[in-house]
Amino acid sequence: MWNVPVTGLEVLAYVVKAARRERYLGLMVILARTAEARTLHEELVRDWTSIHDVTGQSIAVLCPDPRFVLRESEKAGRYHAIENMVTNYWSDLTLDEARGLPHTRLVIPGQDSLPRGRPVPFPPYPAEVQQAAWTEAVTRCATYFGIHESRLPAVLVLCFRDEQDVLIQLRPQTSIYKLCKRIASDPGYEPGDADRLDERDKLAELVKLLAIAEDSEALVPDNNPPRTMRRLLTVAKVSAQFEGLRKHLSMIANVDPDLNLAWCTELDELTDSDADHNAVLSYLSEMTQAVHAHPRKTELLSLNKKARKVERMVEAAANPPPEWRYIPESPTTRAKREAKRARAQAELAELERVLNSRPGLAAACKTAARAELGACEIAHLELDEYIRIPRDYPTERIHAVTPIGPSPDDGANTATHNDISGTVNGTVVQAGHIDSVHFHDRRRWFGIKRKRGRQQ
């Protein structure tokens, strides 16, 4: 098993996400303190190697690491993982990305080209220390997942590929190894289903994408801009500029009557014709040059500037820049997209048919619980059990498996509803078997907020 020590409730959500991303079928959380499940804790330490081996790479196991229980001298200041809504630091963190961070030690088994840590085939601490760490982790995990104290001791199995999770309430003599072996030997899926599940998710996403038409926007030039006088005058801004030019000429008629008459006559001829825009630009350019050379230039009241303004407006109308335009999907593209979507839907339907024929991990957990515990009741958690509990996990997913009647081993009637008063407040929650990501509590980094003066 691999240990992922966590010193704050906030990180549990990201531990669960990490296990899901690493393609585990489920995550097993052991919710049992030594006082109420001493035999279970002794077995966990004694048979660590066997449990580690039997769960394999299909089921991640949350397990504590005593190294991260805080000492008294460290309790004054604490760091907790708080999601940064700008960077989504924790939500987007991958195991590979975490490798080089100074606050993180990451171990990924099975990747020889990368720095590897070793799986822990034996408990690394004495039994009493390891058992204390398990006990210390219970309250935090139970609170996060919304499990009431009366349901403990229990094993919670988060079934990532199913629509429900399973809480297996334990008898005092329950063997965690036998329970794990029963689940792992028939986890509700067959070899190769992990790849099928991944392929199903990819195909479902592809079908959604292919349902969207491939419309687009693009910079499109005007293929038929107004480049004749008649069409230029249909452009409001151009027409207004020519009207302004005509008024300007009437204001300066007395300065040079002959030249003014020539300009006005040519302007009337242009506006009454369908001359090319180049002829219009030539007329305006000649007017500008004549104004510059005129001996009474100042009396023409900046006619040259007015002519340049009209010239710029004609240029802009005759040679407009490309514009962003909506381009609908072509019939050919639509036909190809729909054909591709139909193929993806057919593949998805076949995969779903195969996977729906599997009982799934949740059903496998219930079957294993009945075989190990005997007769059981299976039901949703009662709403009033968790409705007032502060929680971040969707507890309504959880189905509780409660043993009833005598145990198949000794015939004793040992139902597990136990309303234990008080709680054991701890400072560390650790998780294992999802590779080792150690979240230390003594450094600052982006997305981490420091809290002082209280314990979690």
Image: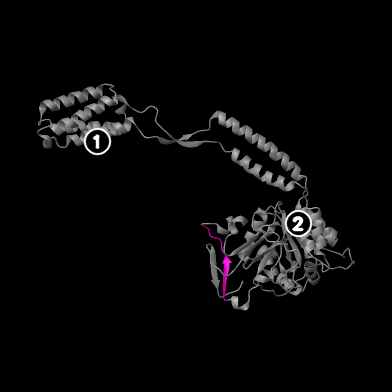
Considering the numbered disc 1 on the image, is that residue within a helix, a strand or a loop?
Answer: helix
Which corner quadrant holds the C terminus? Answer: bottom right
Q: Is residue 226 shown left or right of residue 129?
A: left
Taking the spot 76% from the left edge, 72% from the top edge, the residue there is 127
Residue 294 or residue 119, whichever sits in front: 119
Q: Is residue 30 magenta?
A: no
> To which quarter of the image does residue 287 belong?
top left
Considering the numbered disc 2 on the image, is that residue within a helix, a strand or a loop?
Answer: loop
- The CA distance from mark 2 to mark 1 is 80 Å
Location of residue 74 in the rendering, given as x and y in whole percent from the top left corner: 59, 75
Location of residue 414 in the rendering, given as x and y in whole percent from the top left corner: 84, 68
Q: Which of marks 2 and 1 is in front?
A: 2
Q: Is residue 50 shown left or right of residue 397?
A: right
> To which quarter of the image does residue 270 belong?
top left
Location of residue 53 in the rendering, given as x and y in whole percent from the top left corner: 78, 59
Which stretch is magenta?
A: 76-85
Location of residue 17 in the rendering, given as x and y in whole percent from the top left corner: 64, 56
Label 1 sits on residue: 309
**Total marks in image:** 2
| 448 over 357 or under it: above or below | below
Q: Which amino acid does label 2 sit on?
A: Gly
Label 2 sits on residue: 56
